[in-house]
């Protein structure tokens, strides 16, 4: 399991990386979890967390309500007693275990979604989880004892959010993509133009390392280059 340490001593551990990333952030007193991966990976994820000696998670933040990010929200809350936080635009999807629709950005993915879109959404169901905390816009984490904040970064979905920890590390869900050698644009989005505007918002923070829901960590310079290219 890959572990990073921030300037203030927060330990960031990637606990799952098969197809979708999930992270734990802790200072030894409080623990925050970002995303919960596919429902089918729930048992393995719980085992990994317990192997780290963690018996309680204070807060689970979901970057959005797609099944590969929210699939184990209900299970994690049950196992570790955490509160679940999500943006208002995603809350009803999470409460009913449904994945919000997206569009393919590139021609191949546009064709794929047009062909299988409705059927895929029915397959991407997961255990419903009524959120404990619903936010409407930017949200400070100071009240939870965590040095960080949440910002609204719509585009991939209307309620996508990003989590900034210690001013440096930014968890971006699917607002950025870390698997492609050809850039950081995700294959799917509800609104590509809004997505690119959210890249600008991310670059408006002091963040230096951007941690996507899929793939490797992205450096600020790479995101800046892609933003400049897409912005035209």
Image: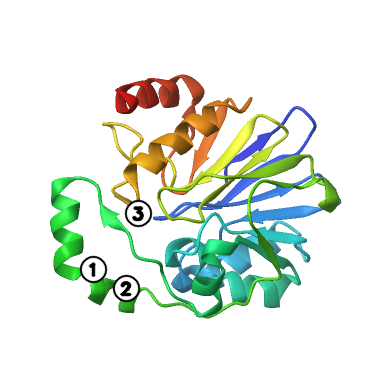
Q: Where is residue 42 in the image (x, y as percent from the top left)?
A: 53, 71
Q: Label 3: which residue?
A: 190
Q: Position of residue 181 (x, y in %)?
A: 28, 32
Q: Are marks 1 and 2 in contact (CB under 8 Å)?
A: yes
Q: Do the residues labelled 3 and 1 touch (CB within 8 Å)?
A: no
Label 2: state its secondary structure.
Answer: helix
Q: Nearer the viewer, residue 102 or 62?
A: 102
Residue at 51% over, 56% down: 159
Q: Who comes first in sequence, dot 2 or dot 3?
A: 2
Q: Which of 53 and 5 is in front in this view?
A: 5
Q: How far apart are the two marked residues, 1 and 2, measured between alpha carbons?
A: 6 Å
Q: Label 1: which residue?
A: 117
Label 3: state its secondary structure.
Answer: loop
Q: Label 2: which residue?
A: 121
- Of badges 3 and 1, nearer the viewer stands 3
Q: How dense is the environment of label 2, judged by Cα within 10 Å: few (below 14), some, or many (20 and up)? A: some
Tell me the quadrant of the picture where the C terminus can be found.
top left
Q: How dense is the environment of label 3, judged by Cα within 10 Å: few (below 14), some, or many (20 and up)? A: some
Residue at 62% over, 68% down: 46
Q: How far apart are the two marked residues, 3 and 1, measured between alpha carbons?
A: 13 Å
Q: Who comes first in sequence, dot 3 or dot 1?
A: 1
Is 34 on the left-hand or right-hand side of 177? right
Q: How far apart are the two marked residues, 2 and 3, measured between alpha carbons?
A: 14 Å
């Amino acid at each position: 399991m890959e572990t990073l340490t921030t300037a203030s001593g927060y330990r960031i551990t990637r606990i799952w990386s098969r197809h979708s990333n999930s992270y734990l952030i802790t200072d030894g007193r409080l623990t925050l979890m970002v995303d919960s991966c596919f429902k089918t990976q729930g048992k393995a994820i719980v085992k990994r967390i317990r192997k780290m000696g963690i018996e309680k998670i204070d807060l689970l933040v979901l970057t959005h309500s797609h099944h590969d990010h929210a699939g184990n929200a209900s299970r994690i809350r049950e196992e570790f007693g955490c509160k679940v936080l999500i943006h208002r635009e995603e809350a009803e999807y999470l409460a009913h275990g449904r994945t919000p629709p997206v569009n393919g950005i590139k021609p191949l993915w546009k064709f794929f979604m047009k062909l299988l879109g409705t059927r895929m959404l029915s397959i991407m169901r997961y255990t419903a989880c009524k959120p404990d905390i619903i936010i409407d816009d930017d949200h400070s984490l100071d009240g939870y004892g965590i040095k960080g904040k949440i910002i609204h970064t719509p585009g991939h979905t209307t309620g996508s959010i990003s989590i900034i920890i210690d001013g440096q590390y930014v968890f971006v869900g699917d607002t950025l993509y870390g698997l492609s050698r050809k850039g950081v644009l995700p294959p799917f989005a509800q609104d590509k133009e809004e997505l690119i505007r959210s890249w600008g918002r991310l670059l408006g923070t002091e963040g230096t390392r951007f941690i996507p829901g899929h793939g490797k960590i992205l450096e600020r310079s790479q995101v800046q280059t892609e933003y400049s290219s897409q912005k035209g």
